[in-house]
Image (tube, rainbow, N blue to C red):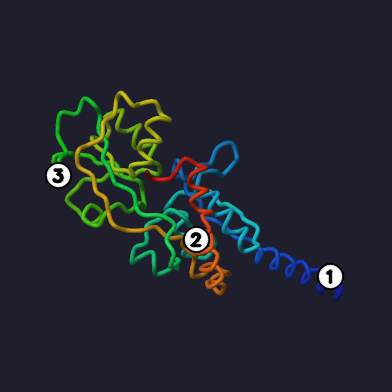
Amino acid sequence: MPKSPLLLVMIATLLSTNSAANEQKLIVAFSELPPSKVFHEGRFSGAYAEFAREMAKQLALQIEFRLCSLIRCLHMMESGAADIIIGVKHTPERKKYIQFLNTPYRSSTEKVFYMRNSEHRQLAMYSDLYNFEHIGVKRGAKYFNQFDNDSYLNKVSVSTNSQNFAKLMRRRINLMIINKEQGEYLINVLGINQQIKKAEFFVKTDSYIYLGISKNSKHIQDLPLFESAMSKIVNSGTLDAIMNNTFFKDN
């Protein structure tokens, strides 16, 4: 049965309204990364969450967080289902579908390895990694090129760093890699300080971390506005204030 002209007008108006509303949203792909990205009791918090809110404020957009695993978040960025992502390393593969802003919001942190206190093997240099049977990594994460591309290491992936600590405690892995600040935070939260030790070997890369916009986002056409907002947030001291207020600034 053909639709009436009035019904067609109502449908068109509704679609137009929904489209306009979506244009005003900034959808953030949010994978938990304590302490910088935390989802607890229905609230998104941490330095990166506050940073995203400030970016939305500068652009006069309504923010909407979408909780997802890292792999899922990256898929959302690739398809354009999410507009921005914070806290991921830019790699040649990711740059195919993510436009990283020119102004970094912080430098990369140390990549460290944790083992059980009872572990007798030493990790003093990279080659010592080959002495460990199972090394825990976070699925989809990038650490440093030599490690990421080393196919001789037996890397066991899980969705979260907390799962890796649990597996380490249960002796299902012998070693795990993580950003230093995330590791220290989780060890304190999990109350395993006396059972875990940090390996002597670590890697500090001279790289920076940038906010990324999906190249398939409706907002990619406003890239200059994002660049301007990012520069303002950094140069005004607002970013430093956010980091300080959320106990997330490097010494």
- N-term mark: 3 or 2: 3
* Labelled pair 1, 2 in contact (Cβ < 8 Å): no
CA distance for labels 1 and 2: 52 Å
Residue placed most toward the observer, 54 or 10: 54
Q: Residues within 10 Å of mark 1 (few under 14, many from 20)?
A: few
Q: Which amino acid does label 1 sit on?
A: Leu
Q: Which amino acid does label 2 sit on?
A: Asn
CA distance for labels 3 and 1: 71 Å
Residue 43 appears in view: yes
As displayed, is residue 66 above or below residue 188?
Answer: below
State the image coordinates of residue 251 (x, y, percent, origin top left). 37, 43
Q: Residue at x 36, y 48 (%)?
A: 139
Q: Is mark 2 on a helix, strand or loop?
A: helix
As displayed, is residue 199 above or below residue 99?
Answer: above
Residue placed most toward the observer, 159 or 57: 57
Q: What residue type is labelled 3?
A: Met
Q: Which residue lies furthest to the front in this view?
A: 236
Q: Which residue is drawn at 44% across and 41% down?
A: 34
Q: Name the residue under label 3.
A: 125
Q: Name the residue under label 1.
A: 7
Circle 3 or circle 2, nearest the eye: 2
Q: Which numbered tag is attached to residue 235?
A: 2
Residue placed most toward the observer, 135 or 237: 237
- N-term mark: 1 or 2: 1
Horizontal arrangement in the rendering, residue 112 relative to residue 249 (left or right): left
Residue 1 appears in view: no
- N-term mark: 3 or 1: 1
CA distance for labels 3 and 2: 39 Å
Looking at the rendered structure, the number of numbered marks drawn on it comes to 3
